[in-house]
Image (cartoon, grey):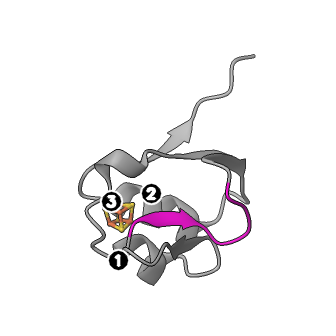
Amino acid sequence: MKIKIIPERCIACGLCHTKAPQTFDYHDNGIVKFYTTPALEEDFPETMENITAVKSCPTSALQIVKEKN
Ligand code: SF4
């Protein structure tokens, strides 16, 4: 599944990294980034950890991108 980061919405709460540490990391200022890439949109496995992390974000800074068929 494709996950999108909207950094302007991130309040650096740390929740996503706690839920899915293999996917989400932080810049020095605490704003979220992907662990594996500087991109703002990337494909990741559809794991419970990743889904929970996205849904846990209190400001919707993380979103699952719906693929168009
Ligand atoms: S859960 Fe949302 S607000 Fe909190 S650090 Fe992650 S992206 Fe930022």
Residue for badge 3 = 57
In front: label 1 or label 2: 1
Q: Tell whether label 2 touches label 1 (CB within 8 Å).
A: no
Indicate the position of residue 8 as horizontal and vertical percent values. Answer: 34, 46
**Quadrant position of residue 46:** bottom right
Residue on which the image places disc 1: 14
Q: Residues within 10 Å of mark 3 (few under 14, many from 20)?
A: some
Q: Is residue 32 magenta?
A: yes
- Verify CB contact (< 8 Å) between mark 3 and mark 2: yes
Residue drawn at 35 percent across, 75 percent down: 15
Residue 38 appears left or right of 50: right
Say which label, 1 or 3, has the lower sequence index: 1
Question: Marks 3 and 2, how far apart in space?
Answer: 6 Å
Residue at position x 30%, y 48% in the image: 9
The amino acid on which the numbered mark 3 sits, given as a three-letter code, is Cys
Q: Which residues are magenta?
A: 31-38
Residue 66 x %, y %: 59, 30
